[in-house]
């Protein structure tokens, strides 16, 4: 169905949970929170999806997206454990993990539009205006989202600077 191999289905079904998890964390926390239950499942789902892209990829851009996703995922989940980054660590963590969500959605949109509906996809050419518009929309969402996340993190930092140590420890 949809011209997807068995390994392709493993790739698709393992990546799929990352989409609602990312949406949930963006809505609830304003960012992907790596040290939370949804964050751990997101990491596992994204890692399996990114690793399984290599044996099924048909275009060189797939290898680039897979490699970038793995590197950003590892950096995003690892940077919070390195105290030498200080406050910048939370900003980098947020940027890296938001980029992983973007890199998940870019091929998701492309694959969906080029495969659905089965036999008569919405898009048959990768230079289709529909596909390019959808990809451009994702890019705009990324830029607006990252801007909002950074503004939110800056506000949190400023509020924390004015809070007393007792208020901070209560959180």
Image: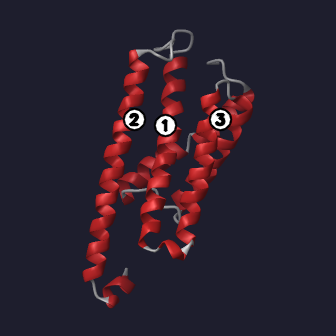
Residue at (34, 89) in percent of width and height: 165
Q: Quadrant of residue 30?
A: bottom left
| In the image: residue 166, left or right of residue 42 | left
Q: Quadrant of residue 131?
A: top left
Gap in Å between the C-alphas at discs 1 and 3?
15 Å
Gap in Å between the C-alphas at discs 1 and 2?
8 Å
Sequence-first disc among 3 and 2: 3
Q: Residue 47, position in %: x, y?
A: 64, 48
* Secondary structure found at label 1: helix
Q: Which residue is mark 1?
A: 105
| In the image: residue 18, left or right of residue 31 | right
* The N terminus sits in image quarter: top right
The total of numbered circles placed on residues is 3
Residue at (63, 52) in percent of width and height: 44
Q: Which residue is mark 3?
A: 63
Gap in Å between the C-alphas at discs 3 and 2?
20 Å
For this orientation, the residue located farthest to the top is 120
Q: Is residue 132 above or below residue 102?
A: above
Q: Which residue is mark 2?
A: 138
Whether residue 40 is visible, yes or no, is no
Sequence-first disc among 1 and 2: 1
Sequence-first disc among 1 and 3: 3
Residue at (65, 35) in percent of width and height: 63
Asked whether the residues under the numbered discs 1 and 2 touch, taking CB atoms below 8 Å apart as contact, a structural biologist would say yes
Q: Quadrant of residue 59?
A: top right
For this orientation, the residue located farthest to the front is 84
Local packing at callout 1 (Cα closer than 10 Å; few below 14, some 14-19, many 20+) is some
Q: Is residue 84 above or below residue 92?
A: below
Whether residue 158 is visible, yes or no, is yes
* Secondary structure found at label 3: helix
Local packing at callout 2 (Cα closer than 10 Å; few below 14, some 14-19, many 20+) is some
């Amino acid at each position: 169905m949809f011209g997807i191999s068995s390994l392709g289905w493993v790739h698709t079904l393992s990546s799929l949970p990352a989409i609602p998890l990312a949406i949930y964390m963006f809505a609830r926390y304003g960012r992907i929170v790596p040290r939370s239950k949804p964050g751990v499942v997101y990491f596992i789902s994204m890692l399996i999806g990114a690793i399984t892209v290599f044996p099924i990829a048909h275009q060189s851009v797939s290898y680039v997206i897979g490699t970038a996703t793995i590197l950003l995922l590892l950096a995003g989940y690892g940077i919070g454990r390195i105290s030498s980054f200080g406050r910048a660590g939370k900003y980098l963590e947020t940027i890296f993990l938001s980029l992983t969500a973007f890199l998940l959605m870019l091929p998701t949109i492309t694959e969906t539009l080029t495969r659905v509906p089965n036999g008569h996809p919405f898009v048959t050419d990768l230079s289709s205006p529909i596909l390019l518009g959808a990809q451009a929309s994702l890019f705009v969402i990324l830029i607006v989202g990252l801007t909002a996340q950074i503004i939110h993190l800056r506000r949190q930092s400023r509020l924390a600077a004015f809070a007393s140590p007792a208020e901070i420890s209560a959180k």
